Amino acid sequence: MKFSFKTLIILITFMFSGFFFLQAQENVRKDYLSADFHKGRRDALRAKLPDNSVAIFFASPVRNRANDVDFIYHQDPDLFYLTGYNEPHAVLLVFKNAQTDKSGNEYNEIFFVQTRNAQAEQWTGRRLGSAGAQEKLGILNSLNNTDFKTYDVNFEKFDKILFYDFKNDVRDNARDEGDLFSLIQQFKTKVGYGVEANSLGAEPKKNNLDLRGLNTIMGELRGIKTKDELDLLRKAVFISAVGQAEVMKAMHPGMTETEVQGIHEFVFKKYGSEYEGYPSIVGAGNNGCILHYIENTEIDIQSDQMILMDLGAEYHGYTADVTRTIPIDGKFSKEEKAIYDLVYQAQEEAIQMAKPGVSMSEMGALASTIINKGLAALGVIENETTRHTYFPHGLSHHIGLDVHDKGPRGPLQENMVITVEPGIYIPNGSKCDPKWWGIAVRIEDDILITKNGSELLSGFAPRKSEDIEALMKQSSPLAQFTLPALKGNK
């Protein structure tokens, strides 16, 4: 057989890309979720699916940042949970009942992944391909995404086809029949998604498309963490708490919000955390009253302010959510301490209440009652029944693969991981004594629901006001880290 020079180069590139792929896999952290974990999650999903059904999961789209630069890719959490796959342009089918192909072979899942491409991999990184998905992910029935269009699945025979509705925000690469846009369009054609009744008035076929049931099923699965998930969540939370503690030691007047953010995220990377679980929130003074303040552009932070820091490391897919509020100069003023200690009291009593059978709403009601009584006692509001917006958000949510993770509604259950995050925010210009203006306090911790109560996971970062002040007196290794000044206008 004769090869053209171009074909020979491609073959050699594939050979070496495979060699370097294997080498790279040997020099990585060893605490990633295993193929057995993901298989167990697919089996657990299959057990919850209704009879004669199939569940469909698509990869997240690639998001464009600007021009020819894309955002760093982040996989759809459900698809990652079920496969461990971290590449785009893929679709997973999980069948309730075993299927039989034309050769008489049985299967209960099919995974279509992006193809190997030596030229693309040189620019954007290694791909598993179908063979890699079989070997590394243990999904034996893995095919190239370009095979999806012609793969014969009789969707009409299922009582239910479960999938999430589409947001119509996926770009089309017209040169790639296996990209996510094409996979979605091919799927819509196969299942009759969006097909209207014909003009002759014929009775339409029974619709077997279920766009709601999957969210409930995945919430039931993801809301209760396995041991493997808890191991990763503990690490993510610990990393985030260490970041808070290191900033407490490094904090001093004159810093910038961006600098504070950078210290946190340096700690994350030092531990091997791949991403932040959400945009970092670092708000000094009145900026802390903006719940999702992510600009972090304030410079020359003043000594008479506090700074609210809400950040979470994402470690191997699992994210923490930890918030601390500290005084810039290391000492709470009288008013700051009064508000801080009130928030701490509400949080502490809510944490003590947390156990199986109790609901997040019950915990939230307790925290609100404590905060209202405290604000009335301080004279911030007229009485404890006065309506106000100083505590405008809920107390708790699930964390896991998402910072606001999926989870079942209703009473707490063992092995759920949730936040407890009361807060008081008094923006400048509020209808109270100006001495309270600009004070914003949120204390957010992550807890594991245990058999008889809860376990505080983020306790490495001090929570009590006196403990924060004590840690802020310690020296920081960053104190000696200085950089040349920027030249030019400020």
Image (spheres, helix red, strand yellow):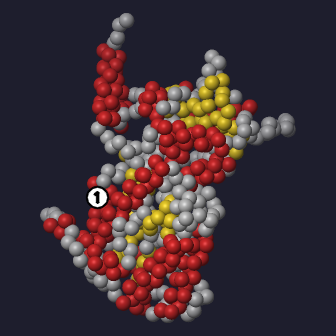
Snapshot quadrant of residue 329: bottom left
Query: Where residue 383 sits in the image (x, y, percent)?
Result: 57, 92
Q: Residues within 10 Å of mark 1 (few under 14, many from 20)?
A: some
Please report the residue visible at 40 percent of the width from the left and 91 percent of the height from the top.
435
Residue 222 location (% of width, % of height): 55, 51
Q: Residue at x 28, y 67 (%)?
A: 246
Q: How many marks?
A: 1
Q: Nearer the viewer, residue 334 or 252?
A: 334
Q: State the quadrant of the C terminus.
A: bottom left
Q: Is residue 183 visible?
A: yes
Residue sitting nearer the eye, 355 or 127: 355
At 62% from the left and 21% from the top, the residue drawn is 105
The residue drawn where x is 35% and y is 69% is 461
Residue under label 1: 266
Asked if residue 436 lies left or right of residue 354, the reply is: left
- Above or below, comparing residue 103 to residue 283 in the picture: above
Compared with 49, 142 (above or below) is above
Residue 300 in sight: no
Depicted 234 relative to depicted 169: above or below: below
The kind of secondary structure element at disc 1 is helix
Can you give x and y, in whole percent of width and height, for residue 396 in the image? 53, 67
Q: Is residue 444 left or right of residue 45?
A: left
Nearer to the camera, 468 or 20: 468
The N terminus is located in which quarter? top left
Horizontally, is 154 left or right of 205 in the view?
left
| Place of residue 468 in the rendered image (x, y in percent of width and height, measured from the top left) | 32, 76
* Residue 247, picture quadrant: bottom left
